Amino acid sequence: MNHQPKDSLDREIDEVLASIAAEEPRRVNAASVRRAMGGRRAALLPAWLAAAAILIVAIGVVARSRTPAEKAPEVVARSVAAPVAPEARATPSIEPRPAVQPNEPRLLRRSRPRAETAVEPPYEGLPRLVVAAIDVPQPLSTGLLAGESILIPQIEISPLVVSSLPNDHEPKQ
Amino acid sequence: MDCVTDEELVHRAQDGDPAAFDEIVERHKGAVFRAALAALRNREDAEDVTQETFITAYRKLDTFRGESQLRTWLSRIAWNKSMDHRRRGRFRSFLHLDEPDAVELPALQADPERSTLAASVHARVRREIDRLPENLRDTLLLASGGDLDYETIASMLGVREGTIKSRVHEARALLRSSLGDASR
């Protein structure tokens, strides 16, 4: 191909630039924009609901996980200070008394500490039951008997002798 | 609604008239699309950006004070979105997807041989445009769109108006040079 004149190149460039400048969107119009806005709003609504639900659950989890650690000392203190009924002193029950009264708030009841940490203090002034140690008997053993073997003497048995009996019952001829 | 000014349309849309905003979309979608196409050089991505631009414009319509023209305001939104798009690297090759548009010439059926030749020439020019440095290419395409004046393009690109003129000149010179070399 020969060297193209400048005018020709400029014309080609201008044509291409004009074709680019004449481009119009094919699928974007007022209706599509409105649809997209509506769709985005509808898509955002479940997202907000999901976010709110996650937030509520997260707050609940955090509140539950933080409560025992924060409330435990308070419960123990209440347990120590609680008066012990005289009956309880006289007849200590085996069942540990609940550290939290039934009419206490639900949150405190939930945060009741474990027995080994919170139940111990109320019994400090009570007489402890002393159970005498039981002597454990020697275990039964079946050792070998070192005696003579049991001998069974032979018994002499004389044969039975049957004397002939008078035959009274012979048939009569 | 053709005789209604942009300013009046904006006021109506701000007052909640959906038909006014529809008219804004129809009136300016071409300019917004071309600004996005200049940046992204891909039709599909430019359409997406055009759609996003009008959604953003609808939400931010209360912030439009009329200090600039509505078309300029919308084009700025489109340009910023296109830059975000470009940074994310989501644009595809200009040549591969936009070449079919370039062959949509009126003489295609009348003289197939000549049309094919023209199409190949156009494709070559587009390829050379695509090879231009980014700042020259953006400027050339925005300036060639005819929707925005040099002052607006200069403020969109963050340069002086004189820079726009020199970039357009330089871009054309580079194209001529590369096309001339290629045709020898």
Image (cartoon, rainbow, N blue to C red):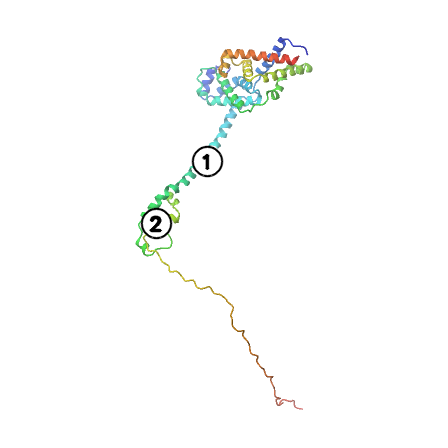
Looking at this view, is A18 or B135 the one in front? B135
Residue B19 is situated, as x and y percent measured from the top left of the image, at: 49, 20
Residue B143 is situated, as x and y percent measured from the top left of the image, at: 54, 13
**CA distance separating discs 1 and 2:** 41 Å
Q: Count neighbours of disc 1 (C-alpha within 10 A) and say few if under 14, some if 14 to 19, many if 20 or more.
A: few
Query: Relative to B47, is A71 on the left or the right?
Result: left
Identity, as a three-letter code, of the amino acid under mark 2? Pro
Dot 1 lies on which element? helix
Residue furthest to the bottom: A173
Quadrant occupied by the C terminus of chain A:
bottom right
Residue A81 is situated, as x and y percent measured from the top left of the image, at: 31, 47
Looking at this view, is A46 or A114 the one in front? A114
Up the image or down, A117 lies above or below B129; here it is below
Residue appearing at x 51%, y 19% in the figure:
B79
Looking at this view, is B90 or A16 the one in front? B90
| Precedes in sequence: disc 1 or disc 2 | 1
State the residue position of label 1: A54
Residue appearing at x 43%, y 39% in the figure:
A61
State the residue position of label 2: A121
